[in-house]
Image (cartoon, grey):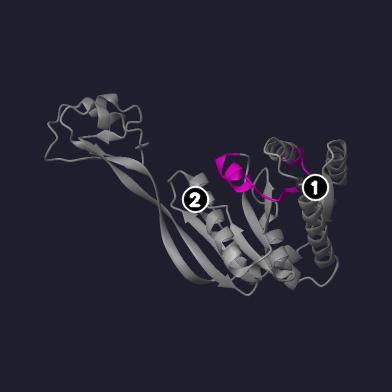
C-alpha cells in the first residue's frame, strides 16, 4: 500500500477538506486522521464506529496515604508544584518519577494513564481510523503511531492500495510520527507571509526524513504576489507544485453540510482536486519505480 500524508506548517489551511475530497474520488482507499490532538476528519465522513479502544501511555504519581509519613520531602523536591498537602495534582504531574525514587517511606506509586481513545469505523468512502487524545495528556506521537499501525493493518487485510492520512499541523513529534515511512507528503500552503515560513519549515522536515513532497496552494487568489513567491520557492528547491485552489465559499458550505467539497462543487474546484489526486498517484508510482 501507499501512504499519502497531508500536512501543513499550521492548522486551518484546508488539509482536512482536501483529504476528505481525495477519499471521495475513486475507491481502494483507507483514511487515517493523525491529528489526534484535534481530529475532525470524522466530521465530514459520518463514520459508523466498528471498533473502539483505549490508549494508555505515560505515568502519574499517586501517594498511598496509609504509607505516607508526611515528611514533606516529595513536596519540597517536586519542581512542577504537583504535590500539595500530601496529594498529587494529576494535571500538574509530569510523570518524572523523581518523587517515587526519593520517597523514604515508599508511599508513592506510578500509575498508568488513560491518555485517549482510538476508533476504527466505516464510511461511505471506505474505512476510517482516527483517535482522540484526552485534553491535557501527552504522548500524542505514540497515539499517531497507533493510528497508522491500525490503518496499515486494515489496508493489508482489505487489500486497499492507498492510505490517505490527514496529518497534524506544525513540525513537532506528531508530524514526524505521521511522516516516517510514508510514500509521499502533500504540503498545503496559504499565500500569506507566515504561510511561506510555515511551508519552509514543513518542507525541511520532509527533506530531513527523505519523504518526497509536493505542494498545493490553497486560497491562492487571496494574495497572488505571495502565491508567486511560493511557486518560486518550490521551483528553486525542486518541489512539484501540483495544485492551486481558489478561495471559494463552497468549502464553507461543504463543512456545514458535513460532506467532502467535491460532493458540493461541480466546477473548477472539483476538477482541480481530481487533477491533484491524479498527479499524486503518478508521483507515487514514479517514486516506487525509482526505489
**Front residue of 152 and 199:** 152
Q: Position of residue 192 (x, y in %)?
A: 77, 42
Query: How many numbered dots are placed on residues in this image?
Result: 2
Extent of the magenta region: 172-196
Q: Which quadrant of the structure image shows residue 166?
A: bottom right
Q: Residues within 10 Å of mark 2 (few under 14, many from 20)?
A: many
SS class, disc 1: helix
Residue at 63 percent across and 39 percent down: it is: 171
SS class, disc 2: helix
Q: Position of residue 107 (x, y in %)?
A: 18, 35
Q: Which circle marks residue 143 in the picture?
A: 2
Horizontally, residue 87 falls left or right of residue 184, namely left
Q: Which residue is mark 1?
A: 290
The answer to whether residue 37 of the structure is visible from this angle is no
Circle 1 or circle 2, nearest the eye: 1
Q: Which quadrant of the structure image shows residue 165?
A: bottom right
Residue at 66 percent across and 49 percent down: it is: 182
Q: Is residue 175 magenta?
A: yes
Amino acid at each position: 500500500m501507499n501512504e499519502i500524508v497531508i500536512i501543513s506548517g499550521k492548522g486551518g489551511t484546508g488539509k482536512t477538506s482536501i483529504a476528505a475530497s481525495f477519499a471521495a474520488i475513486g475507491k481502494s482507499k483507507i483514511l487515517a486522521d493523525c491529528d489526534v490532538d484535534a481530529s475532525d476528519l470524522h466530521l465530514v465522513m459520518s463514520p459508523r464506529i466498528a471498533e473502539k479502544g483505549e490508549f494508555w501511555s505515560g505515568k502519574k504519581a499517586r501517594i498511598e496515604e496509609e504509607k505516607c509519613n508526611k515528611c514533606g520531602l516529595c513536596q519540597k523536591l517536586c519542581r512542577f508544584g504537583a504535590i500539595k498537602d500530601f496529594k498529587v495534582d494529576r494535571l500538574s504531574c509530569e510523570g518524572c518519577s523523581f518523587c517515587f525514587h526519593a520517597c523514604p517511606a515508599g508511599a508513592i506509586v506510578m500509575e498508568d494513564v488513560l491518555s485517549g481513545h482510538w476508533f476504527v469505523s466505516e464510511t461511505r468512502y471506505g474505512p476510517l481510523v482516527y483517535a482522540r487524545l484526552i485534553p491535557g495528556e501527552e504522548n500524542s506521537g505514540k497515539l499517531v503511531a497507533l493510528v497508522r499501525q491500525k490503518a496499515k493493518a486494515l489496508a493489508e487485510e482489505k487489500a486497499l492500495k492507498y492510505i490517505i492520512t490527514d496529518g497534524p499541523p506544525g513540525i513537532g513529534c506528531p508530524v514526524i510520527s505521521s511522516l516516517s515511512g510514508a510514500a509521499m507528503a502533500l504540503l498545503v500552503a496559504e499565500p500569506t507571509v507566515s504561510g511561506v515560513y510555515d511551508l519552509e519549515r514543513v518542507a525541511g522536515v520532509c527533506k530531513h526524513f527523505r519523504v518526497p513532497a509536493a505542494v498545493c496552494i490553497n486560497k491562492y487568489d487571496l494574495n497572488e504576489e505571495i502565491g508567486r513567491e511560493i511557486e518560486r520557492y518550490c521551483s528553486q528547491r525542486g518541489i512539484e507544485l501540483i495544485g492551486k485552489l481558489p478561495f471559494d465559499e463552497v468549502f464553507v458550505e461543504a463543512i456545514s453540510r458535513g460532506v467532502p467539497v467535491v460532493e458540493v462543487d461541480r466546477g473548477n474546484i472539483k476538477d482541480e482536486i481530481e487533477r491533484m489526486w491524479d498527479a499524486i498517484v503518478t508521483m507515487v508510482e514514479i517514486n516506487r519505480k525509482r526505489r
